[in-house]
Image (cartoon, grey):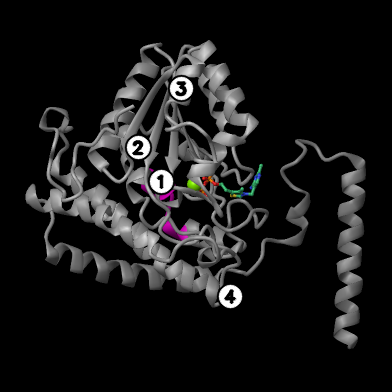
Amino acid sequence: MELLRILDPDGKVCRPELEPAIAGAELRRMLEAMLESSLLDERLLRFQRQGRIGFYLTAWGEEATMIGPVWALRPTDWIFSCYREQAAVLFRGYPLRTMMCQLYGNAEDPVKGRQLPVHYSARDLNFVSVSSVVGTQIPHAVGMALAAKIRGRDDVGLVYFGDGATSTGDFHVACNLAAVHKAPCVFLLRNNGWAISTPRAIQTATATLAQKAVAYGMKGVLVDGNDMLALIHVVAEAAARARAGEGPTLIEAVTYRRGAHTSSDDPSVYREPGEPKAWEASDPIKRFRVYCEAKRVWSRDDEERLRQDFAGRFTALVQEAEAVPARPPLASLFDDVYAERPWHIEEQARELEAKVKRHDATSVRA
Ligand SMILES: Cc1ncc(C[n+]2csc(CCOP(=O)(O)OP(=O)(O)O)c2C)c(N)n1
Ligand SMILES: [Mg+2]
């Protein structure tokens, strides 16, 4: 399979016949989202180090895979993701303030502090709860796509997953089922070279990951995952095929994880320190910036303004999020599982309340 590229690493269009026609304001909006993702990663990784949030992971070097595919979908299409696609949910419209509340797990966290930081869930955006268990979101997306088909809707489900997820049973189950039933879904495989400390070379014996599509009887595409235009082109095409009843597409987006796996990981113990450096040359933001500058929709001044504006907005949001009560009410622990609470849950809720009261009384005496 040949790697599709529309913007070369210098940011020049190398396949003009495939260049998507995109309005200047939209090019700008996408570049801003990529830059903000990178700025947010810098700040939030620092927050984790300062002990303000418990966990974080960065997407440096993979920003194009987060923004281009979301732009190429309709806002009503569904997105299933793993833990690295924070920029995708923000670009969909998740408010930065809500994101900060989720990271803190405070009283305004929509998932009530029950999830790790970065595990977002946005029903109103058709962005399904982040799944940390590798690969589980892939069959979920196929289920959604089949449901849409049965209901006669033309919604598409796009599912993000990593190279590591291709070694799970869920990947196989999902690909097979989707191809057999021509489920309207797009498999967006972010091949970033690593699955924590397992390099791509020993993840699978195949030359590419995209070629696995052939065995399932679906279309496979290999694309430069640091090339915004190529990603937009292939996702738009895959979504159109899915809507036309032609079934799923497996897209392997070749990119690179520049940072650590998560804030709990230290890549210096398993990879050559010079390896990330080699990928700087094809940085997705740098390439897309050159393109936007050539289209005269972006300038150095714009970037300076964005940086300053972002710094101000972020500081204000942090102050707001830190003023929210630190935890959701303890009693909310029992909500959202049963439509009607059964007697034994009621009993446990009463027991907890009594224990807290006793504990508070003891602490006051102490
Ligand atoms: C079923 C399962 N096995 C193992 C893990 C531990 N784990 C968390 S992330 C990860 C690597 C996944 O790598 P990849 O799919 O390439 O995604 P990336 O982190 O590179 O974005 C592993 C093994 C897990 N969360 N779930
Ligand atoms: Mg990976």
Disc 3 marks which residue?
A: 213
Disc 2 marks which residue?
A: 69
Q: Residue furthest bottom?
A: 366
Give SS at disc 4. Answer: loop
Residue 144 in sight here: yes
Residue 309 in which image quadrant? bottom left
Kindly check if marks 1 and 2 are in contact, taking CB atoms under 8 A apart as contact: yes
Give neighbour class at mark 1: few <14, some 14-19, many 20+ (Cα, 10 Å): many
Disc 1 marks which residue?
A: 88
In magenta segment, residue 304: no
Q: What is the spatial separation of the Cα atoms under label 4 and label 3, in whole angstroms?
A: 43 Å
Kindly check if marks 2 and 3 are in contact, taking CB atoms under 8 A apart as contact: no
In magenta segment, residue 94: yes
- Front residue of 238 and 27: 238
Label located before the other in sequence (4 or 1): 4
Left or right: residue 344 versus residue 210 is right
Disc 4 marks which residue?
A: 51
Disc 1 marks which amino acid?
Ala
Give SS at disc 1. Answer: helix
